[in-house]
Amino acid sequence: MDTHVPTARALRVGVAALACLALLAGCVGPSEPADPSDGPTTGTPVTDYETFVFDLAPSADPVIEGGIATDDESGEQHYVTVLTDGTETDRFDASLLPADAAEFVDAVSFERELLVVIQAFPASSVPDYRVESIARDGPTLHLSIDDSSDGGTDDVTVETVLVRLPGDAPDNVVVTTEEGERFELGESG
């Protein structure tokens, strides 16, 4: 009986299995951004954050003081603010803030955390915003947002992204969407 035949066959099967695993690892592993402008390229990555996202149906009043109202004639499309003190949560309109969003806001420990509020006025009734990455570059906080919108009607809702994270208040917050659009703290538009 030739003992080399089963060994050679086992070797071929093993090599084929390793090749398949290598291909699968490439498919399910982390992917590199298609374009460097897709996310923060400078600074220290922030990984210990939590987010909560909700849509607000058309309303004459904004869910947060200074934020976007759906019938705002100024054409505001984006809004960013940072809350660093528990008393600032009074800026939220309790009658418009969904209960689970209110719980998220109430859970912020302002002694060691801050709350970033990002709003957008997309032309979709089913926006699907997600925070993809956050980085700190000195006094600037960079957030990369996936702002995809699949389907829906021409109705417009205000999408609000709440981000709870530790650390000192930034001097600026720069938000970059997957389409490369940028807006920041204190800007309107």
Image (spheres, grey):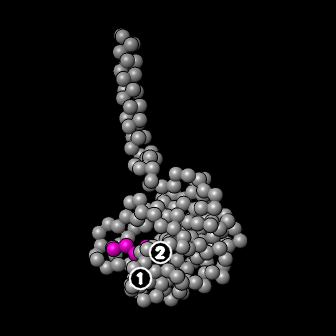
The label on residue 74 is 1
Residue 173 location (% of width, % of height): 56, 66
Instruction: Please tell me whether mark 1 sits on a helix, a strand or a loop.
Output: loop
- At label 2, counting other C-alpha atoms closer than 10 Å, the crowd grade (few under 14, some 14-19, many 20 or more) is some
| Res. 52 visible in picture | no
Instruction: Please tell me whether mark 2 sits on a helix, a strand or a loop.
Output: loop
From the image, which quarter does the N terminus lie in? top left
Could you say which quadrant of the image residue 24 lies in? top left
Q: Residue at x 38, y 37 (%)?
A: 23
Disc 1 + disc 2, Cβ < 8 Å: yes
Q: What residue type is labelled 2?
A: Ser
Q: Which amino acid does label 1 sit on?
A: Ser
Toward the viewer: 101 or 178?
178
From the image, which quarter does the C terminus lie in? bottom left
Residue bearing mark 2: 188
In the depicted structure, whether residue 111 falls above or below residue 95: above
Residue 130 location (% of width, % of height): 45, 64
Q: Residue at x 36, y 10 (%)?
A: 2
Which span is picked out in magenta?
Answer: 119-123
Name which of mark 1 and mark 2 comes first in the sequence.
1
Residue 37 in magenta?
no
The label on residue 45 is none
Q: Residue at x 45, y 63 (%)?
A: 182
